[in-house]
Amino acid sequence: MTMLARKPAVTAPAALSAPASFAALPRASRLRPILAQVIPPLLVVLALVALWEFATSGPGATLPPPSKVWADARDLITDPFFDNGGLDKGLFWHLLASLQRVALGFALAALAGILVGLLIGTSDFAMRGLDPIFQVLRTVPPLAWLPLSLAAFREAQPSAIFVIFITSIWPIIINTAVGVRNVPQDYRNVAAVIRLRGPAFFWKIVLPAAAPYIFTGLKIGIGLSWLAIIAAEMLIGGVGIGFFIWDAWNSSNLSDLIVALTYVGLVGFALDRIVALAGRFATRGTSAS
């Protein structure tokens, strides 16, 4: 009886045992969002390159096709680190010189822009006095500042940095001021209840609440900085990606020019993503209202 009453041991069917290939499914699921972001733009780029090749391969084409760009500028693409002295340098060194100017000019603009934006956002008198002047100055094109900066500084390097500074500071000022003025009233009420004043009020209430606006201004400013340095270097000369582009045009070397423009776009995209990533990290738990 005991043997008949005893239930036989149940074994899992072979179909239910997880094969080794199933272990890869979680990894594939993690890669799927990345592929969904990478594949569409990659396909579009390949389609545009194919269209470019087809459109410029005829006898009357004035621009080189991608195949000719690769043939003419292969050494420039594959070896961006060469340095033969003077202005005969690889694209890495030209980009590095431009990025150094952008870093200094943009850092000065960010510091001054945030401080002035905080002043305008908290003071009605400063808002009424400075806002009309800023609205006029921000419409001046970047290259229009270059002759004035050359007359003031007498040197190309500080002139280029000033052009970057004066071009990128306006969106930082405006967005910072808007962010300060849009601090929720509930935050201000809490600060009043706990008697939070002075620097502590700015650090713990104003800056966290205005951070999304500030980083929006910084993101716009870094893009304008990169645009300004390319244009300024075409006129001031020396080592820099802007001068490289202008020199390639004067030498009728369109292949080098196209390669340089591609690098300019990639670096500009990278700068935008870096500032956006810093903004997401700094504004965790906050949102622009």
Image: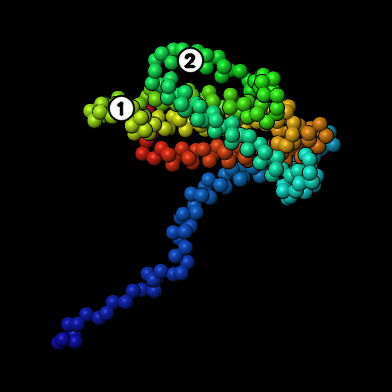
Q: Is residue 76 above or below residue 132?
A: below
Looking at the image, residue 168 sits to the left or right of residue 121; the answer is right
What's the CA distance linking mark 1 and mark 2? Answer: 25 Å
Q: Nearer the viewer, residue 171 or 255?
A: 171
Residue assigned mark 2: 130
Residue 178 horizontal/vertical position (percent): 42, 23
Residue found at the far right of this picture: 59
Q: Nearer the viewer, residue 173 or 151?
A: 151
Residue 55 horizontal/vertical position (percent): 75, 37
Residue 57 horizontal/vertical position (percent): 80, 40
Closer to the N terminus: mark 1 or mark 2? 2
* Number of the label disc, if any, that sits on residue 197: 1
Amino acid at pointer 2: Leu
* Number of the label disc, if any, that sits on residue 64: none
Q: Nearer the viewer, residue 48 or 91?
A: 91
Q: Is residue 138 visible from the viewing direction of this image?
A: yes
Q: Nearer the viewer, residue 73 or 134?
A: 134
Is disc 1 placed on a helix, strand or loop?
Answer: loop
Within 10 Å of the Cα at label 1, are there few (<14), some (14-19), or many (20+) other Cα atoms? Answer: few
Q: Is residue 209 above or below residue 174?
A: below
